Image (cartoon, coloured by chain):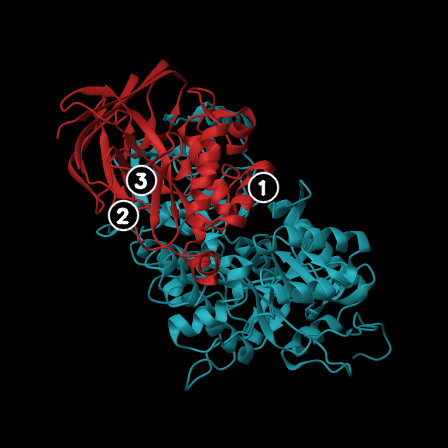
Chain colours: A cyan, B red
Amino acid sequence: MSEGRSTPWAGYAPAQAWDEAMDVHGEVREPYARVYAEIDRMSGEDLYARAEALASSYLAQGVTFDHAGEERPFPLDIVPRVVGADEWDVIAPGIAQRVRTLEAFLADVYGSQHCVTDGVVPRRLLASSKYFYRAVAGIEPANGVRVHVSGIDLVRDQNNIWRVLEDNVRVPSGVSYVLSNRRAMSQMYPDMFGAMGVRPVLEYSQRLRAALAKAAPDGVDDPTIVVLTPGVFNSAYYEHSLLARTMGVQLVEGRDLETLNGRVYMRTTAGRRRVDVIYRRVDDDYLDPVQFRPDSALGAPGIVTAARLGNVTIANAVGNGVADDKLIYTYMPDLTRYYLGEEPILPIVDTWRLEEKAAREEVMDRLDELVVKPVDGSGGKGVVIGTKASQEELDATRRLILADPRGWIAQPVIQLSTVPTLTDDGLEPRHVDLRPFAINDGDDVWVLPGGLTRVALQRGQLIVNSSQGGGSKDTWVLGGVRHRGSTVVPPPEAKVELEGVDSVPQDAHPEDWAHGQQQQQQQQAREVSGS
Amino acid sequence: MSTLRIEHRTRFTYASEIVSSYNEARLTPAWLPRQRVLDSRVEIDPSTWRTTYRDYWETDVVAFEVLQPHSALTVVGSSIVEVSPVRQRDERVGWTELQGPRFQDLLCEYLGNTPTTEPSEELKQIAEDAAGRLSPELTARAICDVLHDRIGYVPGSTSVHTPATHAWEASSGVCQDFAHLAIGALRHVDIPARYVSGYLHPKRDAEIGESVAGESHAWVEWWTGDWHGFDPTNDREVGDHHVIVGRGREYRDVPPLMGVVAGETSSLDVRVTVTQTA
């Protein structure tokens, strides 16, 4: 700490949670030494000026998210989150193991269901999941992959243990923020990346493209891949367009696709072009009006049939939601042992299954000290933190649980770890989680070094989701000595260009959208009555 | 034993020309121990691309699309099926076994009610009263007897999307309603029950070779140690005049035809003809 002048670190004091940058005695943890020193050289004004520059660059780029129906710049904090090489070398295999378990489970659920006949999970658990899609039973993906992209949320608890908080294997979002955050931060701190050996993240798009290509239908050598978006009004449209352009593939909407003779085509100015792989960012229910919601125009009728015939690959596969149901989550350690014959590397959070009477009774008695979550919720929606809820909220929650015990789980409150974060009152500890992204290409699960660190911007707030007003940090995974013989420092991030993402198209076509909706209304389910 | 020839013809006529139509037909009778399918086909006019698959519920499905301009669509399912009479069933379980964890988990898909099958409070009470004094098998029969007494068979009084409770309140319905009501009440007292979609030759003593107007029909099967088919609409056991196409939790799992079309249907004509040939 500098003497004789005010440093931004003055007054920084970790609270009761595990602080990732500093221990309780104020000693800086080793991975943060360089970041600490860099900030220590700055004045408070300097720090705020840089934060301001980050925010305005984001606004200009259109890196926004939807908060309560309003587009806002996604807050990127000026202090990166640093993860040491030794830690990452446990996390990454832990994530990969988790993905392999999820893959095996999904293949089983939509196939022979050995996990049920062998008594690992109750049949009722699958049958009662809202995201168990019987319409896709028996469909076998070309290279066996259903979880092409996953976002496995991790937290680090008060005892410095990394735990899986939830699995996201439907349409996990947020990777564009990882890429954009890195780009902005590498401009802010050009020297540190090389010096610290931060592992690069920008290869994500090429990795994804390669994995999608490997998932193409059998016999297709040079597959046509598209990104399917619900459209410009979707809150993740920025991400969809960024991924399409960095992969060098077409971004399409449902109305650009049609199926013909069990194959999927896109309409182009040069006529129809066969589509082999659809990286879809449209939810299952909206993908195929024949099978799911007949009023949806966001997908295309017949694409589930095309997938069943092996003529197109849908990534991620339809029906994956059964695996990230939070009640299934409680069985994941058992499923890892069952399918892989391995002990889980990353533990889960202790979880009460409220369908079980004894568990339910205990939770009812201790509701004011636990967290309860809907099993199919996302984005922090419906989560009730007992310690912060009013008596009325607790009573209402009790009624909801009793009316639908299958619909809820309970967990102890985890004091998420904290990382220094710039607030109006200077640097303060704020709770964070981490969403590492993994890509499965069928041979290998690649875990993006880093991931999206989400920050709860309010003091003491434990819900970090951006839809709940959270912010983000760039996540720096240190390289360490990765190769025997010589120390290989990854290329400095600043030199890697994120081709073509400087501007996000603002060319929304509301009139086209209206057309889409009109068509949607015209589509009607028809069914024939019997006697 | 009887041999039945079935023709199920559906014709949609559109208000204006349609250029895009994607559908699935569940019109193929199932191969079962007591039901042999001698011949079966689905014809579609205009002729079109199609594929077949067997769905989660083991029903044969013809998926097809019509992407040429057309103002009418005709789908005809034809089949010849040999049906044996139902054997006497002897496997039976009591309430303790039925309500135990083993069968309640094994058959859980046929135990949970859906918004369509959810019974009214009154019907729940009737089912509970029966279950309180009778065996599972007799409870099931008693429930169907009540339905037969209380609900009038009134064609056109409901649609395929009508929840069972509406038919109960109106005291009228069609075969789907009878089936949904029975299923709801049975599941309420922990008896696994499933919806059966198929055909019925309406004449008990049919003449060989005489074609009659038949029905695209629905009934129930409940499980009391073995699956037992019963036709609550006609208050009778399922026999060799019933032909099974598919089974599921409710109508929506086995609709004869479903699909989407960019346009409006102005009329729909459904005819089922059944001929006993042997």
Q: What amino acid is found at the position of numbered circle 2 in the picture?
A: Gln
Measured Cα–Cα span from mark 3 to mark 2: 22 Å
* Labels 3, 2: front one: 2
**Helix, strand or loop status at disc 3:** strand
Q: Are marks 1 and 2 in contact (CB under 8 Å)?
A: no
Whether callout 1 and callout 2 share a subunit is answered: yes
Q: Chain of mark 1?
A: B
- Nearer to us of marks 1 and 3 is 1
Nearer-N-terminus badge (1/3): 1
Tell me the SS state at disc 2. Answer: loop
From the viewer's side, name the closer residue of A84 and B223.
B223
Residue linked to disc 2 = B88
Residue that badge 1 annotates: B125
Q: Is residue A503 left or right of residue A71?
A: left
Q: Is residue B11 left or right of residue A506?
A: left
User: Badge 1: few (under 14), some or many (20 or more) residues near its Cα, within 10 Å?
Assistant: some
Q: Residue at x 39, y 23 (%)?
A: B262
Say which of marks 1 and 2 sits in front: 2
Instruction: Please tell me which residue is depicted at 70% across the width and 70% down the height of the picture.
Output: A415
Separation (CA) of disc 1 from disc 2: 31 Å
- The amino acid type found where label 3 is placed reads Gly
Position of the C terminus of chain A, as image quadrant, is top left
Q: Position of residue A526 (x, y in %)?
A: 40, 26
Residue under label 3, please give it.
Answer: B246
Q: Secondary structure at mark 1?
A: helix
Label 1, label 3: how far apart the Cα atoms are: 30 Å
Q: Chain of mark 2?
A: B
Three-letter residue code for mark 1:
Gln
